[in-house]
Amino acid sequence: MTKRNMIAKAGFAAAVMLAMAASAQADDDADENEAKSLNQQYYQDVQQGLINVEGDHAAVTELILNRNIPIPYTYIAELMASPNAFGSGPACIVCHSSNDPAKSYRGLDLSTCEGMITGSTEAPARAIFVPGQDPKRDIMGRRLRNNRMPLGVSFNVEHSTDAIRTVEAWIREGAENDERFQTEVLPLFNTDDVFGEDTPACSVCHMANEEPPSFHELNLTSYEGIMLGADSVAKGVDNATKVIIPGHPELSGVFQHITEDRMPPGIDPSEERDHPNTQILFSWVKQGAQCQ
């Protein structure tokens, strides 16, 4: 198996490699007891039948994520420089390798640890994650996990159409349930081909606050449903995921989904959203995004 395929698949071998590297580093740091404890616990769990490793995801989950194995930046650097690391597509650094916006999209440098932490430098400059926090809803997390809506819309579809600008303005001005919403905004969510050619209306997939039939229990057919948000049954009404943040379209899930393309560019929406390498990258961020 080639090095590229190992990284792309994030299989059992990659998980074992990281686990062994962590143990070796612990030995080098003279923390022998901790290294032995990790190994002993692993073998004990195997003997007790607590670990059932079948497939790439299970290997990464059991050997790395569940045990909070320290993720070395050297592995993250490999991911950024490797094609197909997060799904079919070019390496991240092909498009993002400089903080100069004339040379790198959004002035984002993913070729260095410092560049990753800095984030995009082109106005509006933004961090793509916060070290020590779950990056799932930050820019990096969204771009690796969230498909642009409507599902399957082409990567090169305009991001600033009249329809998108109408939704943006409504959110920015307070997202009120007024005549403008009823006559100009709500129909956009209930009409075919609005956010992409030959695409269904948003309400075809999001028509009720329960699943099934509505994906993520999201109802885009009424003001009340939209403002309630997603997963209100699974999480409870008080903990539903808000998809509209009045005054802040950039923080609103609906606006993010109709404007942000998933990376790598052009990736098929059927590709796994929670790729093992994505989870390893997220773990590195949650551990503080250490550069050593």
Image (cartoon, rainbow, N blue to C red):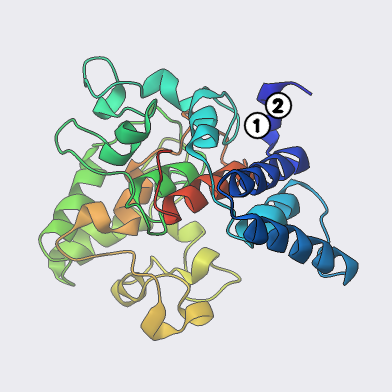
Is residue 237 positioned above or below 8 on the image?
A: below
In percent of width and height, residue 257 lies at: 38, 49
Asked whether residue 173 appears in the rendered view, the answer is yes
Tell me the number on the disc at residue 157: none
Q: Residue at x 20, y 61 (%)?
A: 183
Q: Quadrant of residue 79?
A: top right
Question: In the image, 222: left or right of 263?
Answer: left
Name the foreground residue: 228 vs 66.
66
Q: Position of residue 288 (x, y in %)?
A: 39, 52
Going by the numbered disc 1, the residue's amino acid type is Ala
Dot 2 alpha-carbon crowd within 10 angstroms: few under 14, some 14 to 19, many 20 or more: some
What residue occupies the far top of the structure in this picture?
Answer: 103
Reply above or below: 122 against 145. above
The quadrant the N terminus occupies is: top right
Q: x, y (%) of residue 141?
A: 43, 48
| Numbered disc 2: secondary structure | helix
- Please tell me whether residue 232 is drawn above or below residue 185 in the rendered image: below
Q: Are marks 2 and 1 in contact (CB under 8 Å)?
A: yes
Query: Which residue lies most toward the front here?
Result: 30
Kindly state the secondary structure of the residue where label 1 is placed: helix
* Vertical arrangement, residue 163 with respect to residue 38, above or below: above
Q: Which residue is mark 2?
A: 5
Measured as percent of width and height from the top left, residue 113 is found at 37, 34
The answer, for residue 136, to whether it is visible in the render is: no
| Residue 8, numbered circle | 1
Q: Residue at x 31, y 40 (%)?
A: 117
- Distance from label 2 to label 1 (Cα)? 5 Å
Question: In this view of the protein, which residue sits in the foreground, 200 or 272?
Answer: 272
Residue 292 appears left or right of 212: left
The quadrant in which residue 229 appears is: bottom left
* The C terminus lies in quadrant: top left
Residue type for callout 2: Asn
